[in-house]
Amino acid sequence: MSYRIGTGIDFHRFAEGRDLWLGGVKIPHSKGAEGHSDADVLLHAICDALLGALSLGDIGIHFPNTDPAYKNIDSKLLLKKSYELVREKGYALVNIDSTLCLESPKVAPHIQSMQTAIAGVMGISVNDVSIKATTTEKMGFAGREEGLMAMATVLIKKEEA
Ligand SMILES: [Zn+2]
């Protein structure tokens, strides 16, 4: 039985005139995250954790932000493709644990929707998708609401032949 672990971390700036996508869900807020794609910081961290678990590089290698194909793309598609790469290698997800770090908006009311969205894209159980949230107690870039951060850890298991 072969298990592999992966971690991912991602940051985005807040910007006016952008939608805020987190965990595959559009969150009502006065500003959104800046980025080439829809800038979903949580999905990007999970993608990097999935790719990292099999030493497949990172999201920037697979989905370059210089490629017009990924302009404003729904990051759920990037997550789907990242997990497909894992599945092609014969592995399946055991669980995801993740943490969002931002001052506002409060994400607690949206966590269940995010879990449902992520589980739906990957074809896994919502019970295997943990999403937590914290602030930096007003310190640093997140505390000043200049941007936000997400971290994710995934465990994957080689399926029996
Ligand atoms: Zn990102």
Image (tube, rainbow, N blue to C red):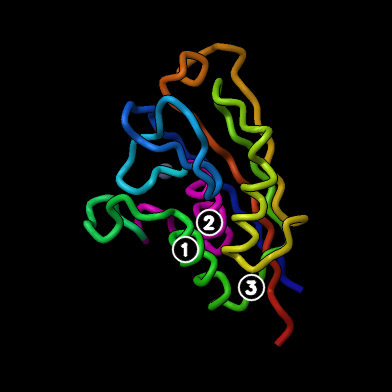
Query: How far apart are labels 3 and 2 at the CA level?
Result: 13 Å
Q: Is the CB of the residue bearing disc 2 within 8 angstroms of ligand 1? A: no
- Is residue 61 covered in magenta? yes
Q: Secondary structure at mark 3?
A: strand
Q: What's drawn in magenta, residue-wise?
A: 41-62
- Look at mark 3 in the image and give the residue it sits on: 91
Looking at the rendered image, the quarter that the C terminus falls into is bottom right
Answer with mark 3 or mark 2, whichever residue precedes in sequence.
2
- Look at mark 1 in the image and give the residue it sits on: 56
- Is residue 109 covered in magenta? no
* Whole-percent x, y for residue 123 in the image: 64, 68
Seen as rendered, the residue at the extreme front is 28
- Look at mark 2 in the image and give the residue it sits on: 52
Asked if 160 appears above or below 64 in the picture, the reply is below
What residue type is disc 1 on? Leu
Q: Circle 3: is it few (<14), some (14-19), or many (20+) Cα within 10 Å? A: many
**What residue lies at 70% left-to-right and 69% top-to-bottom?**
157
* Whole-percent x, y for residue 55 in the image: 51, 61
What residue type is disc 3 on? Tyr
Query: How far apart are labels 2 and 1 at the CA level?
Result: 6 Å
Answer with mark 3 or mark 1, whichever residue precedes in sequence.
1
Q: Secondary structure at mark 2?
A: helix
Q: Regarding ligand 1, which quadrant of the image does it lie in?
A: top left
**What residue lies at 65% left-to-right and 60% top-to-bottom?**
119
